[in-house]
Image (spheres, rainbow, N blue to C red):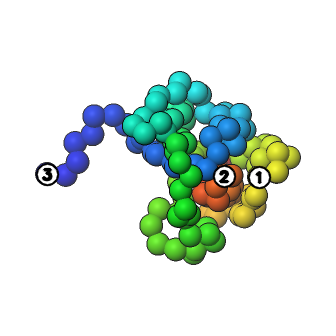
């Protein structure tokens, strides 16, 4: 039977160490729309951001967590390693990220004719792929 979608996008939850740093990256630099905040059980806060029709849930825990994702990007470990956002201003967005001090582990490059990518690292070391079709 397979999946029967109710909407054309996904919701993604990202647990972060510092909510303000995460908002500075996702909201202020990448330009996601901040819909609002929601208090969660135990005093954690969910910052609800829109990237197109996808909901990005940036979660700031009430108590610091000890475990971190495996460093090293794509080949650093198994599991979810990156996610992709299709953009029309790849070069400009990468330049802005660099200007603000974010790591760019994969510089803009063409991966096949008419398709370019770059990888940006958020404040917690998570990778975000920016993809542009020309």
- Label disc, if present, on residue 102 of the rendered structure: 1
Q: CA distance from mark 1 to mark 2?
A: 7 Å
Residue drawn at 53 percent across, 64 percent down? 67
**Dot 1 or dot 2, earlier in sequence:** 1
Residue bearing mark 2: 122
Most foreground residue, 52 or 39 = 39
**Where's residue 22, x and y in %?**
65, 43
Kindly state the secondary structure of the residue where label 2 is placed. loop
Mark nearer the viewer, 3 or 1: 1
Distance from disc 3 to disc 2, alpha carbons, whole Å, reads 37 Å
> What number is the disc on residue 1?
3
Give above or below for 96 relative to 72: above
Residue 48 rendering spot, x and y as whole percentages:
51, 32
Q: Residue at x 53, y 56 (%)?
A: 65
Closer to the eye: label 3 or 2:
2
Residue depicted at 62% across the width and 40% down the height:
19
Q: Earlier in the sequence, mark 3 or mark 2?
A: 3
From where the camera sits, is residue 13 visible? yes
Compare residues 65 and 6 and report the one nearer the observer.
65
Q: Using the rendered image of the protein, determine whether residue 74 is visible from the camera's viewpoint.
A: no
Estimate the x, y position of residue 95 in percent, counting from the top left.
82, 47
The residue under the point 68% across, 56% down is: 121
Q: Residue furthest top?
A: 36
Q: Quadrant of residue 72?
A: bottom right
Q: Give coordinates of residue 57: x percent, y percent.
A: 49, 39
Q: CA distance from mark 3 to mark 1?
A: 43 Å
Circle 1 residues within 10 Å: few <14, some 14–19, many ≥20: some
User: Which tag, 3 or 1, sits closer to the chain's start?
Assistant: 3
């Amino acid at each position: 039977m397979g999946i029967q979608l109710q909407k054309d996008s996904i919701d993604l939850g990202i647990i972060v160490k510092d909510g303000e740093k995460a908002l500075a990256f996702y909201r202020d630099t990448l330009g996601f729309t901040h819909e609002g905040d929601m208090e969660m059980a135990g005093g954690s806060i969910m910052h609800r951001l829109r990237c197109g029709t996808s909901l990005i849930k940036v979660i700031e825990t009430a108590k610091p967590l000890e475990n971190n994702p495996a460093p090293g990007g794509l080949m650093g470990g198994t599991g979810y390693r990156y996610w992709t956002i299709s953009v029309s201003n790849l070069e400009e967005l990468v330049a802005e990220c660099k200007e603000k001090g974010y790591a760019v582990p994969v510089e803009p490059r063409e991966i096949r004719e008419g398709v370019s990518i770059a990888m940006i690292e958020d404040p917690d070391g998570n990778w975000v792929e920016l993809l542009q079709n020309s």
